[in-house]
Each structure stands twice: as C-alpha cells, then as structure tokens.
Image (cartoon, rainbow, N blue to C red):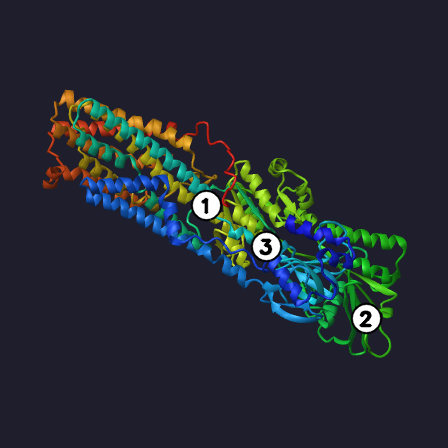
Amino acid sequence: MSSNTTSSLNRFWNLPQATICGSLGCGLNGLSQTDAEQRLQRYGRNADMPSHVVGPLRAVLRRLLEPLSLILLVAGIISMGTGDVIGGAIIVMILALSIGLDTVQEGHAVRAAEELRRSVALKAEVLRDGTYREIDVEEVVPGDIMRVRAGDIIPADALVIESKAFTAGEAALTGEPYPVTKQTGVPTDESDTSTALFRGSVAQTGEAVALVVNTGPNTMFGAAASALAEVQGRTAFERDLHEFGLVIARLTLALVLIVLAVRVVFGRDVLDSLLFSVALAVGLTPELLPMITTVTLSRGALRMAKRNVIVKRLAAIHDLGAMSVLCTDQTGTLTSAEITLARSVGPDGSEAPRAAELGAIAAALGGDRGSLDAALIAGADHAASGWSLGGQQAFDFSRRLGSVLAMRGQDQILIVKGAPEAVIPLCTQQRQGGTVAPIDDEGGAAISARVHALAQEGLRTVAIASRPWSGAPREIETDDEQELIFEGLCAFADPPKPTAAAAIAQLARAGITLKILSGDDPVVVKRLAGLVGLKADRVLSGSDIAELSDDALAVQVRSTDAFGRLAPDQKSRIVKALQASGEVVGFLGDGINDAPALKVADIGLSVDGATGVAQSAADMILLASDLEVVADGVEEGRRTFANILKYVRMGASSNFGNMLSMAVASIMLPFLPMLPTQILLNNLLYDLSELGIPFDRVSPQATARPQRWDMKRLLRFAAIMGPLSSVFDFLTFGALLYLFQATPDEFRTAWFLESMATQILVIFIIRTNGRPWSNRADPMLTASSLIALVVALVVPFTPAGAWFGFVTPPVPLLMAIMALVAAYLLCAEWLKSFAIQAGPGRSHRPHPAHHRAA
C-alpha cells in the first residue's frame, strides 16, 4: 500500500462509523445524486491519469538529437555537399535505419493506458438517494457507500462497514497469495488491512458494504498505475552511449579545428584544408556504431526469443547484461503461486493423514472453493468419495470457522474447520492414534506452540476437529460445535519452484545479487529465502523502511537481501537506494503493486500472464515465469554487449590513431598525406570489414561478470593502441620520404595500403582478450574483413585506382609496407593486454536522480 493511501485510510481506522462519515461529509445512508455530482467535480473522475504517450516524430527527434547521431548527420550532409554523394548517402541511410528500427521496437509501450483501462471494473454498485444503483466506475466518489459481492472487481479504496463472509484476492496488489478476510472493527496495527478494501482487488467470497475513501490516482492501484504516466528517461545503456557520443564529438571538433586553423596559418589552400578537415571528421566518427548496435541488439532479441524472453526495448538487452542486482517479488517467480497442502499434523506433532482427509471432506461438501479448500481437496485426493452433505453451518468470518455434517452409509460425523485460535477452544479431547484422550492445560499449550512453530516456518495453518453425530441430519447450529475432538492441523505453503535455488546460484556465479522484495509476511519471506539458498538473517519490513531516510535506506539495502510487507512505493525506494550505490538494478514482478519498481528499475522484467499494468511497465516479458530464463537472458545480454564493445574498441584505436597521424602529417608535409576521397574510401572499406561483428563469437570470460561501458578503460585502450598505430604510421612516413623518396601519389597509395592492412588485420587481435588463434572469429566476421581487405589491396592496381589518385608503387616499397604491417601486428598483440586490463576502473557513481522516470 502506498504511503499516501495508508495515511488517508489510517486517519479513519480508529473512529466510529458516524465520525468517519462526518469527516468525509457524508452519511451512512449514502450520497444524494446532487452531492455526488459536486464531489465528482471536486475530486475528479475515478480513473487514472493518462499515460504519457510519445509520438513517432518526437521519438525520432529524441534519438536524432543524440551527440553521435548529430555528428553522423552533419558528416553525411557535408560529405554529400562536398561531392561524396554516395558516402554521405550511406551514412545518412545507416542512421535512418538504426533510428527507425529502435523507434518501432519501443513503440509497444504506448499500450499501457489501454491495459489499465481494461483491468478495472466498468460498473459499481453504490447507495444513491437511499437506494443501490449501478453507475459507471469512473463516477464513484469519496463518501459513497458501495456494495461488492463475490466476483466483483473492487472499484475504489474503502473502509468496511458490513461484511458477510467476505474475502478479497489481493495477490496482484500486495503479493499476498492467500485470500484476505475483510471485516469491520479496529485494525491491530498500521500493517493490518483487514478493514480496508482496495481498488483493483477481486472479491472472492461473500458480500461487503464499504465507505469509499479514495478514488482514481489517490488509490493504491492508482499510485502504482501512475508510474506508467511518467516520462521514461534514459536507460543505463543510453546514458553511456550518450556519454561516448559526447567524447567523440569533442575529439572530432578539437582535431578538425586545430588541423584547419594550423593549415590556414601555414598558408595552405583553404578549400583543400576544409575538405580534408571534413574527411577527418568523417574518419573519426564511428558511423556504423548505430547500425552495429541496432543489428547486434536485434540479433540478441531474436536469440532471447528462442530462450522464452520477449524484448520490448532493444537497449534493455545491454542493461540486462550489465545488471548487478536483481530484485524480485516472490509470488509466481520464486514460488509457484499455487497454495499447496504442505503437512497434515496430528495433535502430538507427528504426520497424520486423518486431519487432511477430514479437512478435504469438509472442503468438498461445504467449502467456499477458495485456494485453501482447493489445496485440501488436491492434497487428500478422493478423501470425499462416497460422502454426502447432511447439513452445514457456512464459514463465519467473525467466528473464523465453519462446520459440515458428513454422511456415508450409517456413518455420520460433524467436521469443524477453521482458524486454530477459534477451533481449539471448542475441543475437550484430542486424537491419539486409534483412541481419544482429554486435552489438559499442558496439551493445549503444546498445540498452541505447534501452531506458532508452523507460522515461524511460513506455513498457514487450519485446525480440524470432529465429533460423532447421532440423530437425524439437519442444519448445524453453533451449539452443536461443542466438546469436539481435536484431529490436528493442516499446514499450507506457497512452495518455491524446484528450479529457484539452482537459478539463484547461477545468477550468483554471474556476479548478480538477488534480493526479495515482497508484500508478504516477513516470516514467510525469511522461510522462503532459506529454502532457495539466500542468507536472510534479517528481513526488513515496510514499517521499518518507512522510518528510514533515503540515505539510511541506501546503507541498509547493501547488507539486507529480503524485505517483507512492502508497499509499492517502498519497492521503488529500495530500487533507487541500490541505484544510488552504483548498482545496475533489475526488477522482476507480475502484480499491480510492482509497476512503480518495474518503471524505475534499470531493467524491468515481467512474465507472461502478469497483470497488464506490470507488462506495460516492463522492458522484457518472460514467457516462462522462472529465474532460469533470467539467467539465460543475462548471458545473452552480455554476449550482445561484448560484440558492441569490440566495434567501439576498434574505432577508438584504429580510427583515432590513423586520423591523428593524418592530422600531424597534413601539418608537417607540404602536400596532403591522403586525399579527402581516399580518406572516405579508407573509412568506408574499414566499416564494411566490421559488418560481421554482430555475428561474432564471444568467449565465456566476456560473459562471466556484469558489463558496463567504462569510459576510462575505453580511453585507456585508445590512448595505448591509437598512438601505437600512429607510431607505425610515422615509421611509414619516414621510410616513404627518406628511404624511397616517394612522390606524393606514391606516398598516398603506400600509406593507404598500410593503413587498410593494419586497421583490418588488427580486428582479429582486438576482438578477443586472449590469443587470436585460440578464440577464432566467426566466419561472417572473417569473410567481411578479408573481403574488405582484398578490395582495399586491389583497387590501387586497377583502372579505378586512378579515379582516387592512386598509382602503382614499386615492389621494394610494397615489401617494406608488408614488413611494417607484420611488425605492427606483433606489437599490437603484445600491448593489447596492457590496453585492456582494468585501470582505476569504473567508480560506483550514483545514477541521475530521475533514473528512468523523469
């Protein structure tokens, strides 16, 4: 329950009904139609705020205004304006394709508001002008008296005035798998919601009359749903890509301006200098990065679909691979979300099937068909076979028990089933094997201790008692439920999934910490944590968290792995506290109460069959509600990011090194070291060589730990490998100028060949942290690289070479180029380990305050 909703309800809980109505300005006879219309104007309609829908144009503009996209767009336009129409058009086309695919993939989130609308009741029954009438659910206002019956979806938050055997299913709201009994009275504490009804929950049994307190966005449902109306900010991947784009933009602008200014000061031709500077800008820009990223992520999405994961937002694949903490609700993810009969315990504490068998007979003949009765019938299969109903007293929620008279042939037995604290005081004897014995004070205390012990194990108990029936069958009266024989206890559980413990261990090996964020009782959460292998010496409850400041909570969440009785806003607070510590946080949930946390997490995961609100707030939907699927998805996310990182490394080293060499050479030489068209051809062929990266293999070491963009390590890599490339370029310059006395055309041709050979062949070295021969490239990458290399080496020797200003170099010069290329590759392999190893590392800096929600 949200804190706002809690405070709104709490101020009424300890007041008499007349006082409550007085505070709301209403009466127990309901509202008049005129008063209701006035309240509708004051409080607004009982509906949620519309979700923020970003139009296609705005979605495209948001991506286009990214630094990297702007650089590519400007570079493409300038290239076309200076004569390179084909190269410029390719750049613009790649950019448009990448943005288009990304926009279409993320367009599914606009269904959020429609899913919300479908998940709420369309009609409500309220007391108006002294009579009950059906009205549109949006017209319900605070102060209305409403009536709800079994099967209804509760239309507003309200306080119970009358209750007749009423229970509500609140699993989608609170995570509580058991039906919750609703009754009049005073709650025991702030966490006790037995006197409150919540919008979006489902009436399971009985009937209730309640006073509406909150409607629309002020309800618990509305508070959770309002998260979908918030503007979605950048994800961790998008923030890192934005930062990388800014770095590239600054380097490009600085290098271009320096080269242009120095050449103009030295009296070089202004137009040639401008064209050369533009070519440098294009050469520095990793124009294939958007396409490489989109294609790689798209392939990852296809592979994840085969692993039962539907990707709604492409960037979420990287975020999943970067995830360091996974927060999950327990119901339906760690547990099966199906109540089962865990134990049938006799009065002495030993396993005794008789209690479950009698309970199953009572459930089959006179139960309410709720989850506990269903578990009894399933747990004692065929126990009710041959028995018929002779009479009953339906379950009374004020007395918390019910009775049936079961008959089979000449046998007649009265079976009483209910809460232990209600049934045990009615018992004077207890079953001991085939006999019965009186219950003394010591025996009564032992039974109560056993109930408490089962509760500590997270098990809910139902007591079973009986007595022989003599006389004709008839309806059961309260006086008949006396001098009973205590048969034992039936204990129920929402058991953990068989795969949960193994999946958690797999996540731990992958460097991911699991934390349980549940709306269920802390005792139940602690037991579950122990069953699935988590250390949960301490479980923080919602009331504990409410007393903590954000800073204090950020400290507590580091050492606490289990949380219980959480309200929706408390789940999102925990997620934000983890993010403030530098963690990349995923959240797995399937209920309405999970929507705020799903929205604020770096990666929101929901499951097939979850509420529409949860699926709308999530970035990925698991077709199998199992943590094993998450673990598989994490591996896929890391594999995808590893291939994206390969392209960035290559561009950061080869592009930067070659463009730096050209910039220095253009200032020192009396002629351009490479013509603008040759630079663009160099850049185009190099990009084509990397088209196979999305298909490349990834080593197990690259997927072993969470992965994130680390700008310091990228800059370190570029600072080592880039200058290494420049050193061999300068050696090439020296050999060409002083050893071979090369002409300007021979110089450009030879350097073009050396540049293409070093850039393309070093791909096979940079793509892996290990030795190239022990971790071979995928055939697709091998083919794209070698084809581009062959084209680069052949063009200067064909008639087309003359169009680019190439000439045929002498053979000794070509042999020297080959030797320099071989030496460069050996040095690159030697220095690679120093360039890749972690320097200071990425600091755990806090995320922006808005995270994904503005």
- Where residue 806 appears, as percent x and y from the top left, is 13, 35
Density class for disc 3 (Cα within 10 Å; few <14, some 14-19, many ≥20) is some
Residue on which the image places disc 1:
635
Drawn side of residue 182 relative to residue 151, left or right: right
In whole angstroms, how far apart are the C-alphas of marks 1 and 2? 58 Å
| N-term-proximal mark, 3 vs 1 | 3
Task: Judge left or right: residue 506 versus residue 20.
Answer: left
Image location (x, y in percent) of residue 24: 71, 57
What is the spatial separation of the Cα atoms under label 3 and label 2, in whole angstroms? 49 Å
Tag 2 or tag 1, which sits nearer the N-term?
Answer: 2
Could you classify mark 1 by the number of other residues whose Cα lies within 10 Å: few (under 14), some (14-19), or many (20 or more)?
A: many
**Mark 2, other Cα within 10 Å: few <14 / some 14–19 / many ≥20:** many
Q: 581 and 713: which one is in front?
A: 581
For residue 566, say whether it is visible: no
Q: Can residue 454 be seen here?
A: yes
Q: Is residue 183 left or right of residue 123?
A: right
Q: Amino acid at mark 2?
A: Leu
Q: Is residue 640 above or below residue 158?
A: above
Q: Nearer the viewer, residue 293 or 216?
A: 216
- Callout 3 secondary element: helix
In percent of the image, x 72 and y 49: which residue is there? Answer: 190
Residue receiving disc 2: 414
Q: Nearer the viewer, residue 838 or 604?
A: 604
Does the residue at mark 3 contact the one at mark 2 (Cβ under 8 Å)? Answer: no
Q: Nearer the viewer, residue 772 or 230?
A: 230
- Residue at the (38%, 46%) spot, across then down: 63
